[in-house]
Image (cartoon, helix red, strand yellow):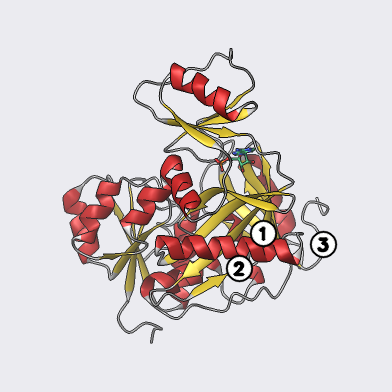
Amino acid sequence: MRMSKSISIIGILGGGQLGRMTAIAAEKLGIRTHIYTDERASPTEKIAYKTTIAPYDDAAALQKFAESVDVVSFEFENIPYKTLEILEKYVEVNPKPEVIKICQNRLREKDFVNSLGVGTAPYARVSNRDELEAAIRKIGKPSILKTTEMGYDGKGQVQIESLLQQIELKDGVEYVLEGFVHFEKEISVIVARGKDGEVKCYEPAENIHKNHILDITISPANISKELAQKARDIAMKIAEGLGLVGVLAVEMFVCGDEILVNELAPRPHNSGHHTIDSCITSQFEQFVRAICGLELGDVTQHSKAEMKNLIGDEIALAEKYAAEPDCFVHLYGKATAREGRKMAHVTKVGQESVVNSQ
Ligand code: AMP
């Protein structure tokens, strides 16, 4: 017995922890997961029903994969667009490849967000030294230079303090210069949109980064009701504007009464991991429901939550957290703990802080 009559197996591109937690959620609904990844021994492989290990440009492997599943989605956005185009010939892909095209390029993403009347930091395209100098004059200092593609967790970012600063711009690489936002808080909203256009939005969560990597998420965010509604409205507007079928994380900066959008991720997101233990429907189950055309689940948050990523050596803390009655530990099944590598997360539900309990 399973929830969906028409979908018995989903295909997910990528084998990281997001795919792993999606596969666990899918199993709960009686839906199997077939993973396609170019990495051996991925965190998802141990959980998934089936895994294909092949490069993302292997057309024959992609066709075989597509023909073995009922719908395809992805757990990371740096997938070549061509890969999704190949898959779409054989199987339904949700969200649509067009969504990934927008979200995997910071310039396209900001142009799109602004086209909806939603604000971002000021920005300019840069591809050489002259354009960089013109952009710094226009946007001012401090500002942040980012590669338009393949950047995450602060990778490919340089803070610009002066026009004279020595910056090495790589030939053929496109960059975006962004004005530095003096934000009070970073928040994110996870929103789901189903095939029938139904939209459901989780509470905004507050995010604290360490070395550009998400360290702690507190949910709900400690912001006014008005700001929380504004954040939800922005997320819903973007999901609708994209014609999303799936889940989307919208990362935002709070500056006084204003909210600026920093980044979009059209997939489950690290700041939504707490939903597994704090909400009626987790972001992973919601993702499966949305891409399979099932009714969306209830997003009510039944417990306050604080999620901490266990990064690199912090994995040593997992046992201590596991002994605490209000902590839920989720290991990702990664063999080696490298610096900056997300190994696990812990969600503490209720009032107390995970940080204070260390
Ligand atoms: P990103 O890769 O764009 O998500 O950036 C990683 C982190 O860098 C963000 O979560 C912020 O903490 C910081 N950051 C990125 N862009 C800006 C900006 N324009 N102004 C201030 N901080 C930023």
- The answer for how far apart the CA atoms under marks 1 and 2 are is 8 Å
Query: What residue would you read off at disc 2?
Result: 202
User: Is 167 located above or below residue 304 in the figure?
Assistant: above
Q: Earlier in the sequence, mark 3 or mark 1?
A: 1
How many neighbours does mark 2 have within 10 angstroms: few (below 14), some (14-19), or many (20 or more)?
many
Query: What residue would you read off at disc 3?
Result: 352
Question: The N terminus is located in which quarter?
Answer: bottom left
Find out whether the residues at labels 1 and 2 contact each other: C-beta distance under 8 Å: yes
- Res. 217 image quadrant: bottom right
Report whether 85 appears left or right of 136.
left
Residue 245: x and y, percent?
40, 67
- The answer for how far apart the CA atoms under marks 2 and 3 are is 21 Å
> Residue type at mark 2?
Tyr
Q: Nearer the viewer, mark 3 or mark 1?
A: 1
Foreground residue among 154 and 338: 154
Query: Which secondary structure, mark 2?
Result: loop
Query: Which secondary structure, mark 1?
Result: strand
Q: Identify which residue is drawn at 37% across, 62% down.
A: 95
- The answer for how far apart the CA atoms under marks 3 and 1 are is 16 Å
Q: Earlier in the sequence, mark 2 or mark 3?
A: 2
Ligand 1 within 8 angstroms of badge 3 C-beta: no
Residue 193: x and y, percent?
46, 70
How many neighbours does mark 3 have within 10 angstroms: few (below 14), some (14-19), or many (20 or more)?
few
Query: What residue would you read off at disc 1?
Result: 205
Q: Identify which residue is drawn at 52% across, 54% down.
A: 117
- Res. 51 image quadrant: bottom left
Ligand 1: quadrant of the figure: top right
Foreground residue among 327 and 124: 124
Query: Which secondary structure, mark 3?
Result: loop
Q: Identify which residue is drawn at 32% across, 76% down.
A: 8
> Residue type at mark 1?
Ala
